[in-house]
Image (spheres, rainbow, N blue to C red):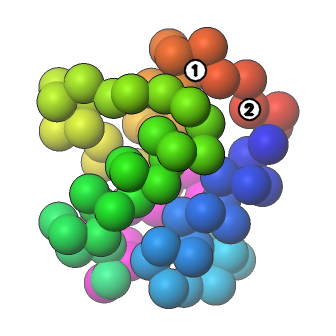
Amino acid sequence: MSENLYKLIARVMNVSVSNINDGTGPESIESWTSFNGYVLLYELEQQFKVKFTLDEAIDVKTVADIKRHLKNHGVILNE
C-alpha cells in the first residue's frame, strides 16, 4: 500500500514516483506548496477514508509523517 501512497503523492505534486520516499517533503519537492499540501491532504482523506485533524495537517513535514498519521487512523500500509 505504500506504493499507492507514493503514487498519489507523486500525482498531486506532479513528480515521478521515483522522487518519493519517507524523507520527501516540501523541502525536497519544489511543487509541494501550501496549496498542493492541502490538495494532498484532501486526496489522502478521500483515498484512505480518514479525516485529519488540523494538528495532524500542520504536523506533516514528510511522507513519514503522513504514514504515521494514516497508521494512527487505522490504515495499514504494507512496507
Residue 37 in magenta?
no
Residue bearing the label numbered 2: 77
Predominant SS along the magenta part = loop
Of callouts 1 and 2, the N-terminal one: 1
Residue 62: image location, x then y, percent: 39, 50
Q: Secondary structure at mark 2?
A: loop
Residue 27 in magenta?
yes
- Whether 14 is drawn above or below 33: the answer is below
Residue shown at 73% from the left, 23% from the top: 76
Q: Secondary structure at mark 1?
A: helix
Left or right of residue 50: residue 62:
left
- Between the C-alphas of marks 1 and 2, the distance is 7 Å
Q: Tell me, yes or no, if residue 44 can be seen here.
A: yes
Residue 34: image location, x then y, percent: 17, 66
- Whether 57 is drawn above or below 42: the answer is above
Residue shown at 57% from the left, 73% from the top: 10
Please tell me the numbered disc located at residue 71. Answer: 1
Q: Amino acid at mark 2?
A: Leu
Callouts 1 and 2 close, C-beta under 8 Å: yes
The range drawn in magenta is 21-30
The quarter in which the C terminus is drawn is top right
Residue shown at 47% from the left, 73% from the top: 12
Between residue 75 and residue 42, name the one nearer to us. Answer: 42
